[in-house]
Amino acid sequence: MKKNNHPIIALVIFLLIDCPDIDAQIKPGYLIGFNISAATLETSGTISEAETMTGIQIGIITEIPLKGNFTLQSGIMFSAKGSIYKIDTSEVTISPIYIQIPVNAKYSIGSEIVKISLFAGPYFACGIGGNKYTGGDLQKISFGSGENDDLQFFDIGFNFGAGVNIKRFLISAQYELGLANLLPEITGDPEMKNRLIGISLTTLFAGK
C-alpha cells in the first residue's frame, strides 16, 4: 500500500522545488461541507455490507501557488465519518470523528472568473471522538491498539476530486480511499477501511 503513495507525493515535492513563485500570493480560506461514508469491513475474505452515514466536514484551507496552473492545497479540518453494519441479527453503528490534514496538488484551468479544478493527494487523520451503537447500547469510541479498543488512532489514504472555482468560491466533490486498517492489530484478521464521498464549499481570501 505504501508504494501507491509515491507518485502524488513525488509530484508535490517536484512542484515545490521547481517553483519560482513559491513566495507569491498565499490564499487562506474556510471549508464547510458534508460526508457520505461507509467503511468497508472484511473478515476472512468476506465483506460485510455497510449502510452509509452522513456527517459534516469543516475546517481551514490554504492554497499556495506553485508552477504554472498548479497550486498546493492543504489545511486542517474536523471530519465526521461512519458506517452501519448488520451483523447476524444485530445492527452496529460506528461514527468516528477525525482531525484530518489533506495535502492536495491542484490543477486549474479557465478564466479569472470561472475555473475548473482537478486535485489529488494523500490525507492524514487522527481520531478524536465519536460514538458506537451496538444492540441498544450507546458508548464512546475508544481509540488505540489494545484489546479493548475499537479503532486505531491514525488513518491515512488518498483523496481525489474535481471542483468549480467561481471567483473566490470553490465548490468541489471528492472521493476518499482509506488505506489503513482501522481495527486494532490485536484483533487479527478483520480489516476496516474508510470510504467517503464529500461535497464542500470553500471560500478563499486573497493573500498579502
Image: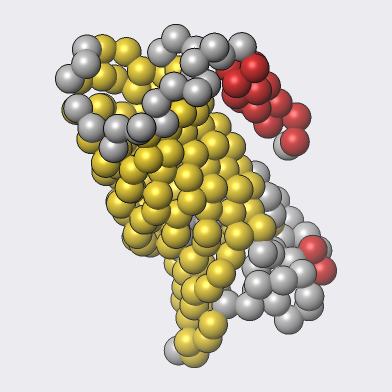
| Residue 118 sits above or below residue 32 on the image | above
**Foreground residue among 62 and 148:** 62
Colouring chosen for the image of the structure: secondary structure
Residue 191 visible: yes
- Which percent across, then down, holds residue 30? 33, 48
Q: Residue furthest front?
A: 208
Q: Quadrant of residue 125?
A: bottom right
The answer to whether 32 appears left or right of 131 in the picture is left
| Residue 29 sits above or below residue 87 on the image | above
Picture residue at 64% right of the left edge, 17% below the top: 17
- Which percent across, then down, holds residue 76? 48, 51
**Foreground residue among 28 and 31:** 28
**Foreground residue among 20 and 110:** 20
Picture residue at 41% right of the left edge, 43% below the top: 61
Q: How many marks?
A: 0
Picture residue at 30% right of the left edge, 51% below the top: 33
- Which percent across, then down, holds residue 77? 45, 54
Q: Quadrant of residue 10?
A: top right
**Foreground residue among 90 and 36:** 36
| Residue 7 sits above or below residue 186 on the image | above
Q: Quadrant of residue 111?
A: top left
- Which percent across, then down, holds residue 110? 26, 12
Quadrant of the image for the N terminus?
top right
Residue 187 visible: no
